[in-house]
Amino acid sequence: MTKVGNARASTPCRGAATPLGPLLTVIALALAAPVVQPATASAGAYDFFSCSQPNGAAASIDGWTPTTGNSEVETENECGEGGYMWAAVMGDKAVPVGSEAVWAFVPPAGTQIDEATLFRTFNNVDNEDTGAAFTFENLKAPYRFSSPFERCGVSTVYHYSCSTTGGFMGRLAPNTESDVPSTDLLSEPGGPAPGIYMVAGCWGGLGGSEEHCEGGTTGPIAFAGLVSARITLEDNSSPKVTVVGGTLTTGTELEGEQNLAITGTDTGSGMFRAILEVDGKVVQTTAVENNSGRCEDVGQTRDGRPAFIHAVPCALEVNDQYVFFNMAGIPDGPHRLAVQVTDAAGNATTVLNREAVVGRGACNGTCGDHARLAARDARLLKPITRGYARSGLRLSGTLREPTGSPVAGASMELLQQAAYTGAPLRAIAATKTNVAGEWAFVVRRGPSRGLLVAWRSHALDTGYAAQIEYHERVFADIGLDAPRRVRMGVPFDFRGRLIGGYIPPERSIIQMEIFFLGRWRTIETLRTNARGRFAYRYTFTPGGPGRPSYLFRALIQYSRAYPFLAAASRPVRVGVR
C-alpha cells in the first residue's frame, strides 16, 4: 500500500477535545553502562533503541505487539527497510467507528519504563463526509485506555485538526520528537507494568452507530508512524552468580591470561560484563557472553550509558561460562583482586574477592625453572641422629642449569621445621650462590627437625623451583645439679633445666630417678615451668642402707609436643653422711 507521511512530517495540534485511542510507540532501548555497584544498590537502568538507531542503522522491535480491530485498519513493520513501524486507517471503503490499529510496547519481565523518547509522524487526510465520525492518531501511556499525551485528528464539529503541510525536515528531525511525560508512566497500585501505545483509528464523536470514516481514496486516511524510539528501562535486581572454577580462584602467581568460570541467572536485562578490580580500582572489563551478538553496546546515547538494539540484550542464564582477564600491565606483587558481574543495567554482584600475587618478579640467578640443586655431602641426605651439643650442621652444594652451567648470584633460602605437631616451616637463613654456583649454610644447634635448602626461580614465586631436604634427629639435653654431700634427714634440692628450648605450653614431664639395687628406679614425676626449668626436694631417711653415696638422674620421654628424642641427664652423685 501507499503510505502517507514519508515525504512530509506532520505537526500534531493539541486541543481540548481529543479522541481516546491506543498509542503506538517504537522504542529504542539503550542499555545503561554497567557501573560497579554493591548488590544492595538502587535499581539500575539501560537504554534500548527500537526500529532504528540514531545513526539510521536498523534496530529490533522487541517488546512491540501489533493488533487490529478489522480488515479496514492495518499495521506494518517496515523498520528494516528504512521506513516506519506504522498503523493506518484505509480509505477505500467505509471504516466502522471504533476501528483501531495499535502498536503496544510492554517492558520485559523484571523491568519497567523509566523514560522514553519517540520519533513519530502523524498524517491525517480525513475527507469523510459522514457526520461527526473522524480519524485520529495518538500516543498513550501507561495503559491502552489512558488519555493520550499526544494526538491528532480532523473534525469540523470539534474544530480539532493537525497540519500535514510544511517541508520534510528528516526522519529524526526535532519536530518529530516526542517525550513521554513522566507522569504518564506511573502505574496504578497493583496494576500491570506501564506500557506505551500508538494508535490510528476511526472515532464516532457524538454521532450514532451508523457513522463511519471513508476518505474515498486507495491510500490511508489516517497514518501513525514510528521511525525510532529510545526507551530507558529500570532493572531492580542484581544477577545471581557463583564461581565454579577458573585459574583466578586457585592461581598463586598470576601471569598472562587468567580465567573465571561462572554459573548464574538474571531477571531483566541479562548478564553483561565481568569487571576486574585490583586493590579497589577497575582495571579491566570483559563481556560475559555476547548472546549471539545481541549483548553489544552500539553507543550513540546522550547520557553516556551503553545502548542496545534488543529489549533483553544479554543472556539471562549462563552455565560454566568462562570470562577472561589479562594480567599484563598490573604491577608485579601481592594485590587484592575482586571480580564483579553486572547486568546491562549496572546492577553488580561480587563473585571473587581474594589476595593473590600477580607476576613472578625478577629472575633469581636465571629465568629458567629447571636449574638443579645438589648437596656436596650426600651422606647428610640420610637421617642424622646426634646429641644436642653436636646438632649444628654445615650444609653446602651447588645450583646448576640442566646443561651443567653454574647459576651465580641466586638467592638461596634455608628453612626449618621443628619435629613437633603443628610446627611451622620457617625461614632461618639466606645466602647467594658464588660465581661457581656454590652455596653454603652453617646451621646452629637445634631440635629434631627438617631442614630445607630451596631456590625460587623468580622473586615473587610462592613455590620453589628446586629444593633439598635434610632430616636431623636430636636427643634431648637435660642439665641437672645437686649438692655433692648432704646430711641424713636434712632435705636438699635437685635443680635442672631442658636445654634447647621448644617447651610446649602444657610443660614437659620429667622423671626423677635413683640408681638402686642394680637398676634405675623412678622416685618422682614432675613438670617443668614455661622456661623448661624444674626443681625437686629429696631427703635421705635414717635407717636406710648404709651406702656413702647414690646416683640420680632426670629423664624425659619422647612426646609429639617436644621436638627431641627421649634422653636422660648426666647422672649426679650425692654423698650421705
Image (cartoon, rainbow, N blue to C red):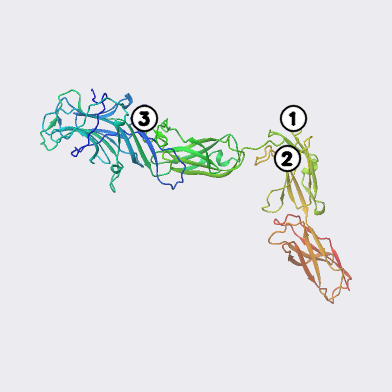
Q: Which of marks 1 and 2 is nearer the N terminus?
A: 1
- Residue at the spot of label 3: 54
Disc 2 crowd, CA 10 A, few/some/many (<14, 14-19, 20+): some
Amino acid on which disc 3 is placed:
Pro
Disc 3 crowd, CA 10 A, few/some/many (<14, 14-19, 20+): some
**Rendering coords of residue 120 (x, y %):** 28, 31
- Residue at the spot of label 1: 403
Residue positioned 43% across, 47% down in the render: 41
Q: Earlier in the sequence, mark 2 or mark 3?
A: 3
Amino acid on which disc 1 is placed:
Thr
Relative placement, left or right, of 208 versus 412 is left
Q: Using the rendered view, name the quadrant where residue 402 is placed.
A: top right
Q: Nearer the viewer, mark 1 or mark 2?
A: 2
Asked whether the residues under the numbered discs 1 and 2 touch, taking CB atoms below 8 Å apart as contact, a structural biologist would say: no
- Residue at the spot of label 2: 411
Q: Would you say residue 161 is visible in this rendering?
A: yes
Relative placement, left or right, of 573 versus 32 is right
Q: Earlier in the sequence, mark 1 or mark 3?
A: 3
Q: Nearer the viewer, mark 1 or mark 3?
A: 3
**Rendering coords of residue 29 (x, y %):** 36, 35
Amino acid on which disc 2 is placed:
Ser
Q: Would you say residue 100 is visible in this rendering?
A: no
Disc 1 crowd, CA 10 A, few/some/many (<14, 14-19, 20+): few
Secondary-structure class at tag 3: loop
